[in-house]
């Protein structure tokens, strides 16, 4: 699975969009980008994933660049409850049911 | 919405004792996992389990660890002889066959080894 690079921490004002970047320059053609988050002391939570098209669900949007070397997770209207560590993970579709490798992630602080 | 549950929420044990951490995965899921997180550190993969056998395990998952699915609903992690360094939060997760890479995590069991 390709390596990812994320900023260590970010701040965001409540009600504003939070844009969390991730670099995955060694991603291969059959690898997906997954985003999980971990609210303090809780288990990680799946947010969204994508291959090459932009994706949106009830939690967030995922924008993947055309060359697929980077992506951005967007929380459109961040709330205090979105304060968490956000993990960008690249996984091959072939690796069905395999381990998730968590890096350090980005610690997002949403401030009032 | 279905969720993964874990018991107990907190377990305190003496070094050298055996502990069993219990998990009830989401009912129609077939892939099961254990992860751990030492305080202040990354979430680390321990083991994955599918079709009644271990699919993959990490270096951490040595002979002191074992997993079992004793019945149709529970998934357990046993540590035979706990060490101080086993103190951590242990998370169980499960995923289904249609989207196996979307893992649903439980709330965790905090294990404290004294």
Image: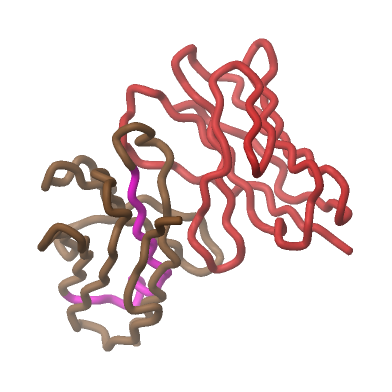
Which residue is at the far front? B1
Which residue is pictured at 17% across the width and 65% down the height?
Answer: B64
Q: Is residue B76 magenta?
A: no
The reply to whether residue B59 is visible in this rendering is: no
Q: Quadrant of residue B15?
A: bottom left
Q: What tint does the image give chain A?
A: red
Colour setup of the view: by chain
Chain letter tied to brown: B
Q: Is residue B90 magenta?
A: yes
Q: Quadrant of residue B34?
A: bottom left
Which residue is pictured at 72% across the width and 42% down the height?
Answer: A7
- Residue B30, x across and y down, in percent: 24, 44
Quick check: A39 above or below B19? above
Q: Quadrant of residue A73?
A: top right
Which residue is pictured at 61% across the width and 61% down the height?
Answer: A39
The reply to whether residue B107 is visible in this rendering is: yes
Seen from the viewer's position, the closer of residues B5 and A41 is: B5
Per the rendered image, the range of residues in magenta is B81-95
Seen from the viewer's position, the closer of residues A25 and B9 is: B9
- Residue A19, x across and y down, in percent: 78, 38
Which residue is pictured at 20% across the width and 60% down the height?
Answer: B73
Seen from the viewer's position, the closer of residues B94 and B63 is: B94
């Amino acid at each position: 699975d390709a390596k990812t690079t994320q900023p260590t921490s970010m701040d965001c004002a409540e009600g504003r969009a939070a844009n969390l970047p991730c670099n995955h320059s060694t991603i291969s053609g059959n690898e997906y980008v997954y985003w999980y988050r971990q609210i303090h002391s809780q288990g990680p939570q799946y947010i969204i994933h994508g291959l090459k098209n932009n994706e949106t669900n009830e939690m967030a949007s995922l924008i993947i660049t055309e060359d697929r070397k980077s992506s951005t997770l967007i929380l459109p209207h961040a709330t205090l409850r979105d304060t968490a560590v956000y993990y960008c993970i690249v996984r091959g579709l072939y690796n069905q049911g395999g381990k998730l490798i968590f890096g350090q992630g980005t610690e997002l602080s949403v401030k009032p | 919405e279905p969720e993964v549950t874990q018991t107990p929420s907190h377990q305190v044990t003496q070094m050298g004792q055996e502990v069993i951490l219990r998990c009830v995965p989401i009912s129609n899921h077939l892939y099961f996992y254990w992860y751990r997180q030492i305080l202040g550190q990354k979430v680390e993969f321990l083991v994955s389990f599918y079709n009644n056998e271990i699919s993959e395990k990490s270096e951490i998952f040595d002979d002191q660890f074992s997993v079992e699915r004793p019945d149709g609903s529970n998934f357990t992690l046993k540590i035979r002889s706990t060490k101080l360094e086993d103190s951590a939060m242990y998370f169980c997760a499960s995923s289904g066959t249609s989207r196996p890479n979307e893992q649903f995590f439980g709330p965790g069991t905090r294990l404290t080894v004294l």
